[in-house]
Each structure stands twice: as C-alpha cells, then as structure tokens.
Amino acid sequence: MKRTEGVGCIAWGVEMRLPLILAGPIVRRATPEKVWVWLATRELLDPPHLMLFTNGNSPSSPGPVKASIEYYPVAVADNLWIYMLCAIPETPLDRGRTYFYDVRLNGTRPLFKSDDYRQFLLKGNRLPTFMLGARGNNNLHALYGSCRKLHGPNPDMMKAAEEILQNASDDNRPQYFFMGGDQVYADDVDNQLLTLTRPLRDALYGGKRETIPGLSPAVLGDTIDRSEFLESFFTSTHMPHHLLTFAEYAATYIMAWNGDLWDPLLKAGRFSDLGSADFSNRIIGQRVLDGAQGAKSARRVLANTICYMIFDDHEVTDDWFLNPEWQLNATKFDSGLRILTNGMAAYWAFQGWGNEPAAFDETYRATIGGFAESRGKGTQNAWSALIKTDWSFVAPTSPPAVFLDTRTKREASPTVSDIDRVGTRVIEGISLSTRRNKEAPRLLDGDERARLSGLIAKHATSGDPLIIVAAAPIFGFPPMEWVQRKIGGVSATTADLEGWSSNPRNFIDAFDLFLDAGSSPLIVLSGDVHYGFEVVGRISTTSHSVPFLQLCSSAMKNEVIGVDKFFFRIISLFGESVAAFGFWDLKENGKTDGPIAYTATNDNANDFFNRRYKSSPYYLMQTQFIKRSGRRSVKQLIERQNNLGELVVRGQQVSHRHWYPASSSGFSARSFKNWNTGSWPIADMVGAIKSIFGR
C-alpha cells in the first residue's frame, strides 16, 4: 500500500496532520516461543512483518532470527488501525539475552522512518529491544506502577522508568513493566487537556463527529460542564470533562503513549505556549507539559520492555461497577451503556488485547472493531462481548504473575446474621468486629474464584514465589482503611469502598485462593491508593501457612497534594509497624457467604472463639510494615510522593524499592529491601494455632 503524507483535520483554524505511526511499538506478551508487538497506525499497512534480531546494532550483520510471522489488523476509526504483530521463532529464544526487533512491510521495506526511531530507541541502539526473564527459575526484574493522570502533579514517573532503562546494563535491566491500573483517566480530565486533544479526536474519524444517545451534541463541547448530564448513572466526583466518545478515549491513550504528537497540538491556536504566565491556569499548564515529556519517556519504555496491563476504574469511570446495583443503574441508560462500552472497547484495543492476544478470535475482533469504527453501531453486541470476557490472566514470567480483574466479576455480599450487622461490640469481654458495609462488594464472584483457582493451580509451584497483581492492595494500610470504613458509613462512593478490607469476605476469598497454592512467598503488587508502602507478612490456618509481601506503588503521576497530603502525613503517624488479626469464617447453615468475624489476636480472644466457634474455619494474618528509609520517624510508613516500584526476584531472594523524585530533574530510590524465602521474618504460627484449637 502506498504511504501517504498524512491525514489532516482543521481545528482552531489550524490543520493537524496525522503521522503514519500514532502510537507504539509496544512489546506485549512474549515467551521464547512467541513474541507479540502492538502498534497503532493511521491506515492499513502493506503486510507488516515483525522481525527479530540477535544483533540489531550491526548494520552489516543484524543477525536475523528465523521466524514465521502473523499480523492482525483491526480498524477502530476511519484513521486508526490497531495491529497485533507476532513472530514465532523456529528455535525458541534464549532467556536473559537482549533481542532487537523491527517492522518491515512485506518483510523488506522499513515501516519506521529515522524520526520514528528517534522517538522510541534507547541510547546507543539502532533498533528497539526486549529481554525475556533471565535464565533459571524465579528470575525476574520488573518495574510496576499505576495511576498516571496526564495533568496530575509533577513529575511523571515514566521519566524515572526511562532513566532506569537508559542507565541499566544488560545484566541489570528491567525486563518487564507491570501496569496495575488507571493507565489513563477518563473521568478526571482537565478542560484544557480535553480541548488540546480536539484536533486528534476529530482527525481519527476524518472530521465526522460521534454522538451519544440521550445526550445533546452540545454536551460534547470542550468547555461545557458534562457533570449534570452524567450524574444520573455515574458517581465520579470529577466529571465536568469526562470522556464520552470512543475517539476521546482513544486520543487520550495515544497522547499518554506518544509524546511527539503533543508538539503540533501545543503549537495550535492558543496553546502555542502552554506554560506561559498568561495561560489561564499556569499550574495545570506546567503539569500538562510534564505529561507531554512523560509521554515521550513512556514511548521509549513501552517499546523496550515487555508490558502487561490490567484496568482499575479510571480507564472507564471512577467507581466503575462499584457493585451490582451500580452496574444495573448505569447500564439501563442508553447514554451510560454507550460510554461504558466506549471505555471498555478502548481498553481492549489499547491494553487488554495484548495481554493474551490468542484469546480474542476473529469474531471478537470484528465485533469490537465494528462497533468502534461505526461510531456506536452494535453497542449491545459489543457490550455483551466485553462484559463476558475473562480479563484476569497469567503473564508467562518466572515466577508467574496473575493479574486480577476485581471489577467486572463482582457480586453482592449481603448481611445475613445479627453478628454480621453489629459492626464492633464487646461479647463476653472480647472486642469483636464484623464491619461489612452493605455497599461494599465481594470483589470476585464464585465463577471468577473458581477460574482463578484453576489458573493458580496450573501455574503456581509449591515452595516457589507467585506474583499477584491486584489493582488495590489486598493487605492495606490499616489507619487509612479505618478512615475509609468510617466515611463509608455515610457514603460508599465518597469512601470508595472498593478495597479488600471493606468487605471481610474478600480476605477469606483471598486466603482460600492463595493458601492452597503453597507459594513461598506470595508477592502482591498493587496501586490505586496514591501512596506507596511495603508489608511483609504471613497467612496461616490450622494446617499450613504462606509468607507474603504486599508491595504498593501509587501514583506514577497523581500524588496527593495540599491539605490531603498533610492528612496523609498525620494519619501515617498512627500506623503500627506490627499487627496480627484473627479471622473466623462463620458459615451459617452451610452458606458460603456467611459473616466474617475478626479481632486483634490475643489469648482471651482465642479462648472465646475456641469455646464459641471452634468448628469455624480460622485464619491468622500477621503483618509488619517496613519503614521508608530516609524518613525521620519510624512511624512514617508510607511513600507520599509520586513513585515507581521495582521488583527483583533471584531464586530465593526477593528485593524491592521505590523510585521517587529527588529533585526537579532527577530521581532516587529508597535502598533495596531484601527478603529470603528460607528465613522469613514472620514466624510460622501453624503449631501455635494447632495448640490453641487442639487440632
């Protein structure tokens, strides 16, 4: 196909021309047997071949890897094609070795121009690179993060990720990037940013505007407050410029991952000097400029690490599928259903497809692509396909990483007994808690728990580590969760009662899933909460126990500021570094959703439950929070700045650190914390539990 010079669209009297490559390349699912690369283009390409090389820096002898190729294009707009490119080597690739890749049209002509390479190559390289996890079992080096809002507070930690990659040697480079949710923000959008993307949005559909059923076309204006038109079915507290159309969602992803597209937009109209003093909101302007620089870093990072991604809620809308009631209300409105479908279709095209490309057959691709390209035809069919999709998946790393969908497979968890309604009270001298807000969902329904159990059983090995990627921390920061529960008594959406602790039944679900795996340790990576922390702990029952690490990195570009940041500092002073809780699963008459009683463990409490609930399943959770190195007080247990997590697993050794902004132009890391699976700092309490219960 003949390459054209670009497709133009006029906005503010200025014409924007779309480049051929809109976003990417991004290395997605990769194993020694098969490598997938994602790409977004302006038009259908001549057959693109993904080429692999063992020595991509030698122009005379690039060392091609013999491989068969596959490619799958999907048109999602007039001028937007999403590609999954695949290379299947004749001989499996070596782990721990750097490979280079390129895309050639018909296997001969380069797709990328010299200016394209400039935008995504690491210094010193002629081609983009990737590396599979190093040789040997349990050998992994990964970056992870979440919550990247383009106009969020500076700096964008994608710049830190690039700095790490640029400075790393081959034997010390991160091979993977685990993206844990809120890769873009669809609800909390600054109006200047929404206006900035208008030429791109219009160009994707060749100037043809989308409409949303039930909403006047005027609502799609850049400056009108959209909140009042959405509050009947959405519950976000930041909706004045909520994304509505597929083009708006798609443009936001493209802007988040291709910083060079910002340049013509920034030069257009009144955005010629976004950060100048006369800009209507200079602080936001500077943050948007930082987002543009972060997007340039993001393109290099995603092109040179193997990336796996899972949604949280802001990719679609805040509180998305908070609980079954929320879902029923939002989808009964035609406008609500269309917006949700737009958001999820964009997630599939830009994120979900690459996690497990083979899971989406031609019919699925045609359904979602046809919906998006037609600007909304077949909404119900597309929505049905999207909502029935199993979004949880296992990344083929070593140790394996299980990414949890804790949003689309939720179920109600009603109170069922007097003990479940009491909140906290004293019974026979023991302070007993059951605190279950009726609005708080069970994050994994029965079908999803069964499916995850099968996945974990298939991929986990007893005695070896297992990584779980969950959007929100499973083992969170107790003082903050206590505040959330108190606020939740007034308003579930204000408190954002979607964490695991908001419904104690979620803890039991997690315990049941992970204990049987026998992993050592369980490593949980999370985000969502806009602060970072590290927890070492152990889950125990009367028969066995599992050591765990809860590692949280949040946010990449959305740290808490102002009064809220001061509140975070104060609340962190109330955290205890060591805690232990006992949980009793009080199944009533064989019901699987009975109440959960829990309390701080002590001899009196154990004696009470031994007498009253001896036949009920018992779980013990012990946690120890790690002090943030560099803090002046031992009780400063959370990282309040923008941050990026780094995880290294080498056999029995597990290491972790947070990168954070150390100055206006550089980044530093809290020193590596190291744990060894053979000498876990939290003792195994199985023997003690058996002695307490006499079994």
Image (cartoon, grey):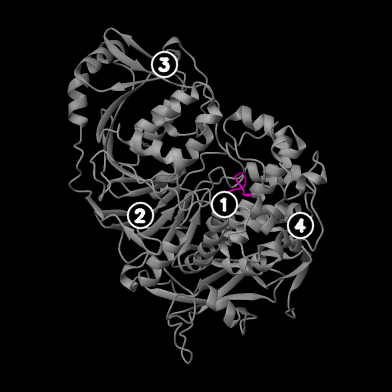
Element class at badge 2: loop
**Residue 476, percent across and down?**
37, 36
Task: Determine contact: label 1, label 3, CB under 8 Å.
Answer: no
Q: In which quarter of the image is the C terminus?
A: top left
Q: Mark 1, residues whose alpha carbon is within 10 Å: few (<14), some, or many (≥20)?
A: many
Q: What residue type is labelled 1?
A: Val
Q: Which residue was labeled with disc 2?
A: 399
**Residue 680, percent across and down?**
20, 44
- How far apart in space, not on screen, are marks 2 and 1 (Cα)? 28 Å
* Marks 4 and 3, the one that precedes in the sequence: 4
Residue 400, compared with residue 690, is above or below; it is below
- How far apart in space, not on screen, are marks 1 and 4 (Cα)? 21 Å
**Residue 482, percent across and down?**
39, 27
- How far apart in space, not on screen, are marks 4 and 3 (Cα)? 50 Å
- How far apart in space, not on screen, are marks 2 and 3 (Cα)? 39 Å
Q: Residue at x 50, y 34 (%)?
A: 444
Closer to us: 239 or 211: 239
Q: Closer to the observer: label 2 or label 1? A: 1
* Marks 2 and 3, the one that precedes in the sequence: 2
Q: Give the range drawn in magenta.
A: 185-190
Q: Mark 3, residues whose alpha carbon is within 10 Å: few (<14), some, or many (≥20)?
A: some
Q: Residue at x 73, y 54 (%)?
A: 372
Q: Residue 571: tell me if it is visible.
A: yes
Q: In this view, does 502 lie to the left or right of 71?
A: left
Predominant secondary structure, magenta span: loop
Element class at badge 4: helix
Q: Which residue was labeled with disc 3?
A: 423
- How far apart in space, not on screen, are marks 4 and 2 (Cα)? 39 Å
Closer to us: 462 or 170: 170
